Amino acid sequence: MEQEINTYIDGTTIIEIEHLKKAFGNNVVLKDFNLTVHKGETVVVMGKSGIGKTVLIKCIIGLVKPDGGKMRVFNQDISKLNQQDLDELRTRIGFVFQNSALYDSMTVRQNLEFPLRRHRKKKIRGNLDLQVREALQNVGLENTIDLMPSELSGGMRKRIGIARSLILRPEIVLYDEPTTGLDPITSEEITHLILELQKKYDTTSIIITHDIDLARETANRIVFLMNGIAYMQGTYEELVNNEDTLIKHFFKRQAI
Amino acid sequence: MEPNQKNETVFSKVIDEFFYGIAELVQFSFKVFKIGIQPPYEFREVWNQCYEIGIKSFILVGTTAFILGLVLVMQSRPTMVEFGAGAFLPAMSSISIVREIGPLVTALICAGKIGSGISAELGSMKVTEQIDAMEVSGTNPFKYLVATRIIATTLMIPILTVYADFISLIGAFFGSNIKDNININYYFNRVFESLHYTDVIPSFTKTFFFGFTIGLVGCTKGYNSKKGTEGVGKAANVSVVLSMVGVIVIDMVVTQITSMMGYL
């Protein structure tokens, strides 16, 4: 049962995925996945572990090559872009990794400066220190600027990961399980941080999560991924009150 | 399964892995040349890697080279004196060090220190998604991480070798002076008199290949490592073994070529 609900913030389509297919050997992860994301919208993708949620967002940013289907981001077909154009496109997309993926050999400052140094020409780069401090201030961790990632807690690493992914002011942010492995209080803080930053920078977001609280607070629309398709879509209330056995079971178990 | 069948399966698996490994290295080296020559160039990162790989190895390489030079002379002296060839000690030590011991030992030390370091670093970056993070930030990780390290090893191993040769010759001088009393000017005059460009050029040239091999193997194994932290350990281990074998094979080939050209 697949349904399309056009709940959107703005009419402009930012991400368009049609009949996306991806398999790893005999394991078919995405069979016929369809999704349209509009400007300013926050779409939360939920589903069982190992069902292909992370693969989906990695396909969007070109880290994983799909086996079939069409995928357009900012009206550009990802599969047809050359490396230079893909790199250019990636500067408009932020990606928050599940384990933060901070560069171990660099300090927090260097981690945040890295995208700026790579993509802002010297003339327009401005004051790096100021931009880094502002990014850290946004996530409430200004005092960690000269620490190494190994000196940070899990929650701090997540925050720095979010700050790094937002430092180039991307229009789209993809979050891969931003609250996984965190205690409920830190999860709530991260949820509020995501909301706050979305509001501040007016980003379009796709959030992969199992965290029902995060989904409830952030989602304009929830997509339930199952058997390689967008099994069901809707607002949080629509899904929670849905009579479908699978959906009901999932939300009931997650709530526990 | 019969024991013979089992042995055949294990043997064919080893052969498969060997050829797969060779193909992987060849493919990787083509990619390095293809991507490495395309602008923009990562000069800053090459410089950083030269510092990390080269400058930080100076103490280790220097200490080892000094001891090797010292021990070489101490071990050779009794036999040479017995045959009345004690006066040839400076010549013998210089040719041995410059032609063979200096380049080979430097490369083997670097295969252990640098090769494993590169492999472990890239491997852990891979399993913790740091390489993916670099890619999604619009930076080509192959160019930034791999090409720069291979260029740095190719440039720094020759420099480290020249340095090791020099320190080793000083060690040899001290070794000679334990039982004899040789003037330093006399010693180094004899050293340079006995060295010809046919000794220096082939041995210096091969160090570029040593450096390239160490960087290539370390990067290939690290960048392609799988299976989490276990894979990282395995990649570092394999990269040291393969680099050392590669260095010795290159050394043998260069020696054969030099010999065929009549320089030996």
Image (cartoon, coloured by chain):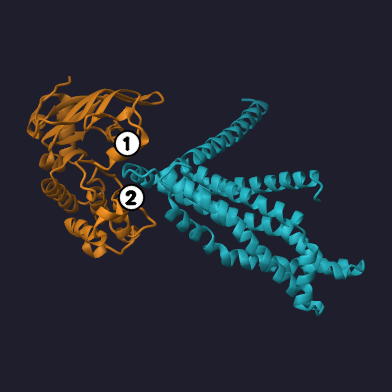
Chain colours: A orange, B cyan
- Nearest the viewer among B125 and B203 is B203
Task: Identify the mark nearer the N-term, 1 or 2.
Answer: 1
Find residue A50 and report its image quarter: top left
- Nearest the viewer among A187 and B179 is B179
B112, above or below B224, in the image: below
- The chain containing the residue under callout 1 comes to A
Amino acid on which disc 1 is placed: Leu
Distance from Cα at disc 1 to Cα at disc 2: 15 Å
Find residue B104 and report its image quarter: bottom right
Residue A5 seen in this snapshot: yes
Residue A47 percent location from the top left of the image: 23, 32
Task: Tell me if label 1 and label 2 are in contact, CB under 8 Å.
Answer: no
Residue beneath the point at 22% across and 48% down: A166
- Count of labels in the image: 2
Residue A34 percent location from the top left of the image: 22, 24
Q: Residues within 10 Å of mark 1 (few under 14, many from 20)?
A: many
Residue A223 percent location from the top left of the image: 17, 30
Residue B185 percent location from the top left of the image: 76, 76
Query: Which residue in the rendered view is the most extreme toward the top?
Result: A1
Residue beneath the point at 42% across and 55% down: B44
Dot 2 lies on which element? helix
Residue beneath the point at 30% across and 60% down: A109
Query: For the N terminus of chain B, which image quadrant?
Result: top right
Residue located beneath label 1 in the image: A86
Residue located beneath label 2 in the image: A118
Amino acid on which disc 2 is placed: Arg
B97, above or below A256, in the image: below
Dot 1 lies on which element? helix
